[in-house]
């Protein structure tokens, strides 16, 4: 029979809509409105997982986000999600989940032997046991992970997508219970922009688990009216199913909205599964409520033992009473409500109270209901054999440190425990707020906030545990927050609310004694359920010297991981304080860290995945190259055509062909990605003269010049050709990767050091598509489509001209990175593809070849032209690169000049750029290969330098390998033979030469 | 070349856009590429009388001194980009004329006018939920009381720099680099999909 623990009536569930679901392969039935937890309990399922370390059977502890045990593996790949809290997961039709941390099955778990040998698994066990040998840790770690893991990560890509969005509320209210609703109402009535975030699917908070009244009517009516009023306010946004995870500085908060998790896989259609809200709030109202504190008694982790108030939630919100015979074990008055309600729901109920004198109102309520109250007593054992059977009860001694008298066994299948209440401080604490100790409640409440994170705590999270107090604090917080955000408020509250039982005179028993001393015998007192840590572990940590509360936390794993101490923190402090004979405030408190609720990685990533992870920059001619089957490489964010294979050519074959053909006829190259900066103003030439090492003051209009840029250390950091467009007007080119860096560098100098200089710099990188024509037939090809006079005498190497190319206004620069006669055709980006196609068509008569970056690299290496960042590495001066010729001796100053006087730069024996020719001309040295002083059988060997560029050249000596290298004292080694060691340990020899392998006098580029 | 390409770039059928392959997004939130317009980056100091006079002569007014809704000038729309930088949106065909006029009017004043017409594209996002779509990518507060119709700012959208112009309450132009346009388009298209059913 299904749902045997479902009450005949009540609960905010839709009994007309049955939902089937599966847990550990078994089918169950629940109702719409259930959580996975309430549906399982309705079916009498208490055993839902095994504990982290000892693999003890575990059941539900709580009904909300503080639940430490009920973490489920939800669904299957690709939708599987580990560590899903069953108490937060809404039920949907077909939900399929498994328990975690058990093998082969939940009922029979091999690792449960850990529990039998628990004495051998004390706190700090891993630190003590798996210390040595260190190299075996990777092996240990795998085994431990498997044994102690919390669920399994998905193995396949997430088919869902996730959204991010920003908002800037005047007032952000966290928590949709009575205090939060009241705060949102009063702030919203002012016209302020309000966002109310509620973790659950419904607003109402504790009122959903209650039978309270407000203004003389059931509280639900007030909740419904409040939600309706808020929904009607245009500036108020209600976010349910939304977890506030982070409270960061300057009131920046992050919340994860679960858009379709409650509908299951594919339930959200094509929409996002979750949305991560990034909220910058003028004021924050924290109305996060309070969590009940478990009592730390012997075997308090047995399935069927749960928080007293959770039972009320199951009963009132979900219409489930998860037992027939309930024992309420408490040290305060609030749990009496659970007892009275459960009795009314049909259960047999008994109360065990630690105190000799329970509160009069609570006691009267129990008496009136006819519930037996056993005072001054404690549960000293829990009998669990495939289910909760009974509890052992003994009388407490006078100071609560021990028990005495006869053991009384009380049959039961459900225990509700209450050790008091803890305000939910996590967010206040994340925001660096101080705490204040509440002596009566034996817990912390929020204290002062820090200025940068203005927030107001209201309601139970502020220590106001009665309903009217909660409502009043909420209204006031909303008024204050709206006022501080600049909105006038009309104050309006409620006049009455039903009395609720508060803790009364609580008796703090941080460790509830049993018939054995703590840590002896088989019974365990858990204070930390998720990480399986006990009060005995805390005491061990004290004995072993981990007395700082932060050390205690880490040594025992208290309050760590996704639980973040929601149920364990205060109890742990209490146990430690008691052991030391101190008060809790003297012990100190650990930090609550974000996230308050676990976040999926998908929510963090948002839309930034796949094609949207980062922009891919494409040139205007990209589409054409793609259609031709070009192979692309990533250069910064750009995709650049690397080579254009024909047929089944591999890269080497294609590049060999392209290299040869460029030097024989003409090649076309897409140079659009080069950085381009327009420089204008009376001080433009002065600026260039400072930026580059060579002389720039006399460059005439129509002329171009190559320049080398140094950083302040005198090291080469960019190069390129700059053209004089007109008087006081220049067009600078930079390397592709250096475009942004160079403009930033120039702007920094202009704005910080030379603000009086009159010069403006504007990036024009993407304005221009650049088509480089290189090769002996470049002139003939261009002549077919251009009206520019291309005669070698009038349009010389390093000149530029304006004119038409294929009918489009163009600037043509006679500059060359290949050493060939070359023309770089610049046209506005929108015409790039058109002009390229026209040139390519006209080029057919000239045996044109398109070539990519790989061929460009080979051709420039044949000429010994450097690539900054490949042949130089930020430690090389122009001299090191054999480029003394470009450093002016006459200029009074340029950036980096002064550093060239440093002794380290003038010393002998620096690494210098040379060419290498391997003795075996067919062998291409791998780039990065080390040049060594002397070959030895094994490392270490003294290193003299490394290969920076290396290619097979079809054009040098009819085809041979060439390389460039940084070599210690390289210029003095010209003509020598050096040894190079390869990765496989073998070595090769090469001759040191000048790094110009082709057309040494440069006649071709001037032709 | 497709019909869309010719429309999107207007000036000549030879011209191409990186967004030519993308069909306009239709629905509650629409996304389309604007016809390519002329763009001129203008640099100068407002304290320089020569610069101001040149602008008045060539553009019809002095550039404004701080961030404010863009100026509607006879030559086009002038956006404030920084303390000494403005961007003029104008007819594409007018760019050479305006550059010449500015150069002549400058008469030796320190002024830079640079053609960046092809550097950027403009996407138009329109619809009742357009502001909601914007919240997916920009850290700017786009609440209608904060970012009002007529205003324009430089901000970020996803990983792009954009010039965001609230053309009307529910209509926004996003100017983006040519090479970032495809990424921006796809990002907005996905964000808008939840409003377009």
Image (cartoon, rainbow, N blue to C red):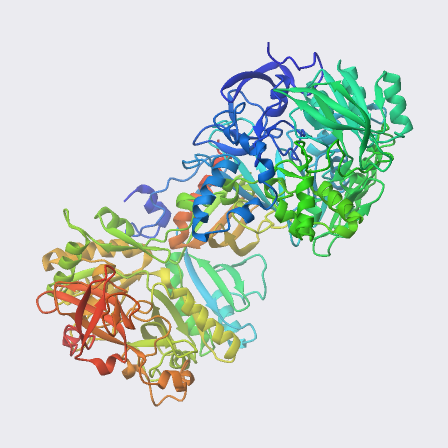
In the image as oriented, which residue stretches furthest toward the top?
A1
Q: How many marks?
A: 0
The answer to whether A360 is drawn above or below residue B49 in the figure is: above
Residue at coordinates 38% horizontally, 81% vertically from top-left? Answer: A689
Location of residue A350 in the rendering, given as x and y in whole percent from the top left corner: 80, 20
The answer to which image quadrant residue A50 occupies is: top right
> Nearest the camera: B178 or A606?
A606
The answer to whether A134 is drawn above or below residue A411 in the figure is: below
The answer to which image quadrant residue B96 occupies is: bottom left
Question: With A519 as the anchor, is A266 left or right in this view?
Answer: left
Location of residue A134 in the rendering, given as x and y in whole percent from the top left corner: 46, 53
Residue at coordinates 21% horizontally, 48% vertically from top-left? Answer: A628
The N terminus of chain A is located in which quarter? Answer: top right
Is residue A138 in sight in this rendering? yes
> Nearest the camera: A207 or A104?
A104
Question: With A698 as the anchor, is A408 left or right in this view?
Answer: right
The answer to which image quadrant residue A673 occupies is: bottom left
The answer to whether A66 is drawn above or below residue A620 in the figure is: above
In the image as oriented, which residue stretches furthest toward the left?
A958
Question: With A174 as the anchor, is A766 left or right in this view?
Answer: left
The C terminus of chain A is located in which quarter? Answer: bottom left
Location of residue B47 in the rendering, given as x and y in whole percent from the top left corner: 57, 75
Location of residue A931 in the rendering, given as x and y in whole percent from the top left corner: 25, 71
Is residue A482 in sight in this rendering? no
> Nearest the camera: B10 or B25?
B25
């Amino acid at each position: 029979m299904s749902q045997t623990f479902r009450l005949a009536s009540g609960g905010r569930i839709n009994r007309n809509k049955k939902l089937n679901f599966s847990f550990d392969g078994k089918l169950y039935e629940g109702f719409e409105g259930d959580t996975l937890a309430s549906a399982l309990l309705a079916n009498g399922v208490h055993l839902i997982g095994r504990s982290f370390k000892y693999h003890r059977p575990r059941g539900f502890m709580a009904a909300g986000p503080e639940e430490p045990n009920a973490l489920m593996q939800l669904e299957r790949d690709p939708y599987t999600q580990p560590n899903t809290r069953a108490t937060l997961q809404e039920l949907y039709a077909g939900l399929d989940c498994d328990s975690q941390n058990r093998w082969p099955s939940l009922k029979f778990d091999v690792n449960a032997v850990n529990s039998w040998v628990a004495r051998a698994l004390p706190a700090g066990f891993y630190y003590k046991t798996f210390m040595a040998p260190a190299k075996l840790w990777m092996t240990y770690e795998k085994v431990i992970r498997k044994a102690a893991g919390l669920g399994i990560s998905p193995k396949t890509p997430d088919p869902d997508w996730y959204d991010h969005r920003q908002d800037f509320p005047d007032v952000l209210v966290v928590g949709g219970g009575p205090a939060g609703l009241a705060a949102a109402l009063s702030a919203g009535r002012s016209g302020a922009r309000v966002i109310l975030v509620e973790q659950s699917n419904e607003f109402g908070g504790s009122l959903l688990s209650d039978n309270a009244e407000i203004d003389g009517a059931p509280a639900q009516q007030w909740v419904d009216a409040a939600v309706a009023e808020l929904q009607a306010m245009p500036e108020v946004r209600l976010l349910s199913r939304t977890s506030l995870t982070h409270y960061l500085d300057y009131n920046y908060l992050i919340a994860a909205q679960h858009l379709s998790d409650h509908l299951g896989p594919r339930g959200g259609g094509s929409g996002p599964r979750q949305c991560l809200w990034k909220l910058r709030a003028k004021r924050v109202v924290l109305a996060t409520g309070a969590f009940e504190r478990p009592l730390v008694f012997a075997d308090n982790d047995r399935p069927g033992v749960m928080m007293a108030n959770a039972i009320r939630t199951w009963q009132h919100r979900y219409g489930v009473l998860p037992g027939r015979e309930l024992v309420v074990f408490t040290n305060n008055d609030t749990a009496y409500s659970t007892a009275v309600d459960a009795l009314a729901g049909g259960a047999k109920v008994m109360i065990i109270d630690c105190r000799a004198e329970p509160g009069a109102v609570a006691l009267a309520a129990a008496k009136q209901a006819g519930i037996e109250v056993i005072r001054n007593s404690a549960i000293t054992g829990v009998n669990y054999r495939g289910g909760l059977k009974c509890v052992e009860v003994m009388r407490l001694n006078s100071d609560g440190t021990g028990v005495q008298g006869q053991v009384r066994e009380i049959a039961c299948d459900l225990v509700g425990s209450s050790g008091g209440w803890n305000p939910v401080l996590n967010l206040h604490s994340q925001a660096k707020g101080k705490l204040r100790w509440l002596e009566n409640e034996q817990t912390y409440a929020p204290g002062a906030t820090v200025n940068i994170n203005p927030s107001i705590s209201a309601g139970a999270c502020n220590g106001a545990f009665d309903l009217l107090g909660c409502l009043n604090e909420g209204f006031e917080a909303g008024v204050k927050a709206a006022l501080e955000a600049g909105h006038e408020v009309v104050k309006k509250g409620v006049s009455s609310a039903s009395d609720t039982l508060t803790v009364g005179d609580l008796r703090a028993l941080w460790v509830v004694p049993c018939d054995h001393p703590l840590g002896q015998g088989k019974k365990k007192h858990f204070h930390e359920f998720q990480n399986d840590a006990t009060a005995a572990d805390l005491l061990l940590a004290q004995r072993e010297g981990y007395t700082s509360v932060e050390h205690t936390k880490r040594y025992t794993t208290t309050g760590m991981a996704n639980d973040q101490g929601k149920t364990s923190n205060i109890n742990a402090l209490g146990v430690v304080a008691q052991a030391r004979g101190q008060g809790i405030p003297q012990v100190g408190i650990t930090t609550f860290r974000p996230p308050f609720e676990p976040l999926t990685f998908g929510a963090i990533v948002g839309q930034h995945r796949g094609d949207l992870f980062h922009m891919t920059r494409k040139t205007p001619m990209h589409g054409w190259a793609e259609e031709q089957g070009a192979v692309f490489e990533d250069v910064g964010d750009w995709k650049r055509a690397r080579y254009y294979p024909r047929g089944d050519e591999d890269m080497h074959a294609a590049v060999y062909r392209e290299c040869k053909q460029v030097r024989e006829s003409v090649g076309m190259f897409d140079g659009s990605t080069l950085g381009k900066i327009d420089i204008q103003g009376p001080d433009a030439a002065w600026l260039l003269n400072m930026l580059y090492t060579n002389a720039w003051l006399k460059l005439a209009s129509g002329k171009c010049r190559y320049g080398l840029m140094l950083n302040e250390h005198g090291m080469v950091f960019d190069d390129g050709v700059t053209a004089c467009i007109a008087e006081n007007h220049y067009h600078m080119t930079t390397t592709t990767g250096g475009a942004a860096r160079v403009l930033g560098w120039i702007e920094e100098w202009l704005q910080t050091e030379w603000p009086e200089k009159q010069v403006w710099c504007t990036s024009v990188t993407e304005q221009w598509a650049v088509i480089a024509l290189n090769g002996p037939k470049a002139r003939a090809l261009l002549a077919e489509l251009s009206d520019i006079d291309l005669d070698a005498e009038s349009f010389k190497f390093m000149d530029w001209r304006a004119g038409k190319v294929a009918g489009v206004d163009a600037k043509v620069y006679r500059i060359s990175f290949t050493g060939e006669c070359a023309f770089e055709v610049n046209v506005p980006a929108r015409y790039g593809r058109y002009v390229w196609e026209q040139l390519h068509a006209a080029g057919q008569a000239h045996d044109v070849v398109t070539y990519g970056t790989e061929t460009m690299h080979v051709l420039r290496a044949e000429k010994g032209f450097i690539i900054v960042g490949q042949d130089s590495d930020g430690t090389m001066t122009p001299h090191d690169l054999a480029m003394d010729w470009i450093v002016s001796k006459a200029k009074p100053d340029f950036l980096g000049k002064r550093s060239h006087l440093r002794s380290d730069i003038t010393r002998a024996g620096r690494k210098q750029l040379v060419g290498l020719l391997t003795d075996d001309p067919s062998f291409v040295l791998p780039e990065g290969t080390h040049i060594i002083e002397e070959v030895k059988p094994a490392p270490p060997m003294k290193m003299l330098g490394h290969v920076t560029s290396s290619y097979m050249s079809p054009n040098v000596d009819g085809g041979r390998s060439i390389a460039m290298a940084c070599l210690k004292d390289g210029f003095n080694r010209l003509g020598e033979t050096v040894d190079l060691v390869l990765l496989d340990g073998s070595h090769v020899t090469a001759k040191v030469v000048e790094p110009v392998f082709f057309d040494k006098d440069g006649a071709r580029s001037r032709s | 070349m497709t019909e869309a390409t010719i429309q999107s770039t207007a000036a000549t059928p030879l011209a191409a856009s990186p967004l030519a392959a993308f069909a306009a997004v239709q629905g509650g939130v629409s996304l389309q590429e604007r016809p390519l317009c002329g763009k001129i980056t203008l640099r100068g100091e407002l304290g320089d009388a020569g610069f101001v006079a040149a602008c008045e002569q060539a553009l019809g007014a002095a550039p404004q001194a701080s961030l404010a809704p863009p100026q509607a000038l006879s030559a086009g729309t002038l956006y404030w980009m920084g303390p000494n930088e403005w961007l003029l949106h104008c007819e594409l065909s007018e760019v050479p004329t305006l550059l010449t006029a500015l150069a002549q009017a400058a008469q030796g004043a320190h002024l830079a006018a640079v053609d960046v017409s092809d550097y950027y594209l403009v996407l138009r996002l329109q619809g009742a939920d357009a502001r909601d779509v914007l919240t997916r990518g920009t850290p700017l507060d786009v609440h209608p009381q904060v970012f009002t119709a007529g205003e324009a700012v430089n901000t970020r959208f996803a990983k792009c720099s954009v010039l965001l112009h609230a053309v009307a309450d529910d209509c926004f132009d996003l100017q983006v680099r040519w090479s970032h346009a495809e990424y921006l388009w796809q990002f907005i298209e996905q964000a808008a999909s939840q409003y377009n059913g």
